[in-house]
Image (cartoon, rainbow, N blue to C red):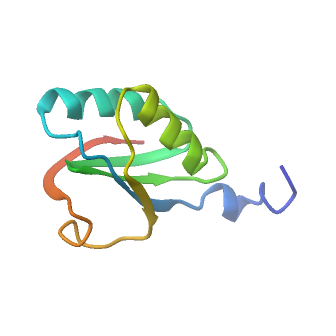
Amino acid sequence: MSASDSSPSRLNAFEEIEIRINDVDTIESEELLRNALKDLPGIRAVRIMRGGATVSHNPVGISVSQIRDAIERAGFTVDGIESGHRSPERRGMKDTGKEIWRA
């Protein structure tokens, strides 16, 4: 880790990503996804939606590829990841309003 990566402002910086996961369509699959993400370091919040999730994370604590790997290890297929925030409808997701974990 470089000196710029460990600066106080960088350590406290969170980014939001939108993850498209088509097979999140039942309560059981939402719970499985929650369990896959809840204990990962650097995750601040996760919001499950039909068709995916929005994840707030600290890129110093965890990379996007590590988040993807955790989701895929849980048996899901990641169809795409985007940075930033757009409405759920534009991402092809249905917001079920279920915030599943917040640090």
Q: Position of residue 92 (x, y in %)?
A: 21, 63
Q: What x and y, as percent, mark residue 8?
A: 72, 59
Left or right of 98, for residue 15: right
Picture quadrant of residue 23: top left
Q: Where 22 sits versus 7, above or below?
A: above
Quadrant in the rendering for residue 91: bottom left
**Taking 51 as reference, is 84 left or right?**
right
Considering depth in this image, is 77 or 43 the residue closer to the camera? 77
Residue 57 position, x and y percent, is 50, 52
The residue drawn where x is 57% and y is 53% is: 58
Q: Residue at left 36%, top 27%?
A: 75
Q: Quadrant of the C terminus?
A: top left
- At horizontal 44% and vertical 33% (from top left) the residue drawn is 72
Residue positioned most to the right: 3
> Vertically, is 13 above or below 86?
above
Foreground residue, 72 or 47? Answer: 72
For the image, the number of numbered tags is 0
Residue 17 percent coordinates (x, y): 43, 59
In front here: 29 or 5? Answer: 29
Say which residue appears at 22% left-offset and 35% top-offset. Answer: 30
Q: Is residue 47 left or right of residue 36?
A: left
